[in-house]
Amino acid sequence: MEYIDKNFLIMGFGISGQGVYDTLRKLGANVFVYDVDSKKMSSLNIKTFRKITKKIIQDMDYIIISPTIKLTKKIQNIAKKNKTIILSELDFAYTYNKGNILAVTGSNGKTTTVSLLKDLLDTLPKNNHLLGNIGVPFSKKVLEIEKEDNVILECSSFQLMQSNVFKPHIAGILNLAPDHLDFHKSLEEYYSSKIKIFSNQNEEDYAVINFDNELCVELTKNVKSQKYYFSTKSVCKGMFVADDMIYFSDGYITYSIVKLENIRYVGEHNLSNYLCASLMAILSGVSIENIAYMLNNFRLPAHRLEFVRRLNDVDYYNDSKATNIEATLTDCRAFDKPIHLIVGGSDKGEKFNHLIDNLPNNVKCLYVYGQTQKKIYKSAKRKKDLLTIKCDKLDRALNYASLKAKKGEIVLLSPACASFDSFDNFEERGNYFKNLVNDL
């Protein structure tokens, strides 16, 4: 790509757009920014737009799209006619990347997986960069990445959907379940966006696939890369669990890794995340001994089924990151004790009948709050034996739950919704909840 005297329009000035901006400025490009929020751009000493016109597009050589921006057909047609090149933020960074890319996607568990993968790769004598949807944009750091470095990327459907040249050497998919239907026009579009992580791979690359998720297996049938699997239930080529032991098989020889009793995790879904990260690490050259050691010592990131405290023999857990229905159902299945479940937040277009109909029997009481309160409550009333309590806000929900929970029971924040009705992000919501719990 050429930069000197070339015009670049960044569409969307969130974290990813700002990462693109920083890199383009270092490269000496002419940078323009579009965003509907003028406050984000008030400090920029460059030309900014709050509306896109035909003339603006015609003046640009490149358009870089931030993950949450959807281009209209009109803009695409004008750009095509004008030979203006359109790139996603992921594609833009990829064009300058020198390192070895390991990318992870899925509906749930991405951050846990890439965090463990980073720890595992840190046992190798290489520099490792943890980037992407986890917080630091790929585009912001790409000029710092050297040829022998590993780049660990957490990839969302937003990032992958509009990417066309991105090609990770090792790509993993954790699971597929309905999510982000407020953004994607259909479930099919959401799933196909996730699967795009494999679309440019060839026979020299690796695809790491959840053998226990039928949708993942079905949708990756035509992947051209070398396929390896991970499973908590079945023997497979890759990483699997059998007889309370984790194994790795290369298709010919099977190696024992570590006993389950020696690693700390809550729920089978987290064990599945561990298997995916470990398999990707082995394919990158990490030794079996180092895999075993790191699994023994890894701790889950904050806000992912995080134990907060025990008070009056009641355990409090924070999974603010559970922003879709399937994540919440998975959380509930991780426990065999009675659960007081706190759900609610901003609406992502999911159908809450699915949540209510599939709640395990150990959910003793449901506390609903936030923007989705009425929708969830309406669905919950169909289940006559489920006690459901409407609450104004999260603090009220916790107060009710703490009063009703008895010795040996669990209070769990697993919202099944995004946080944007009351908080800037799930981290702010999770920290708020933990502070409330610690103040009880």
Image (spheres, rainbow, N blue to C red):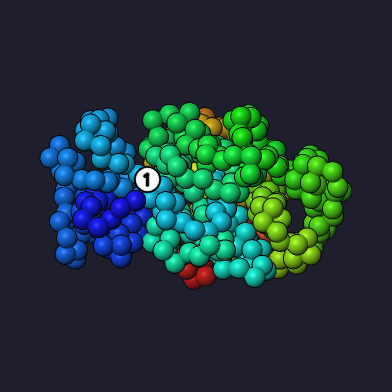
Q: Is residue 43 above or below residue 10?
A: below
- Please give the residue where the numbered disc 1 appears in the rendered image: 88
179 relative position to 277: left or right: left
**Residue at 65% of width from left, 36% of height from top?**
213
**Residue at 50% of width from left, 65% of height from top?**
146
Q: How many marks?
A: 1
403 relative position to 84: left or right: right
Which percent across, then down, holds residue 439?
49, 71
Residue 243 appears anywhere in the view? yes
**Residue at 30% of width from left, 62% of height from top?**
27
Q: Is residue 199 above or below residue 21?
A: above
Amino acid type at circle 1 is Ser
159 relative position to 27: left or right: right
Which of the pair 386/21 is nearer the observer? 21
Which of the pair 429/199 is nearer the observer? 199
Residue 352 appears anywhere in the view? no
Which percent across, then down, holds residue 53?
14, 39
Which percent across, then down, holds residue 264?
72, 62
Q: Quadrant of residue 17?
A: bottom left
Callout 1 secondary element:
strand
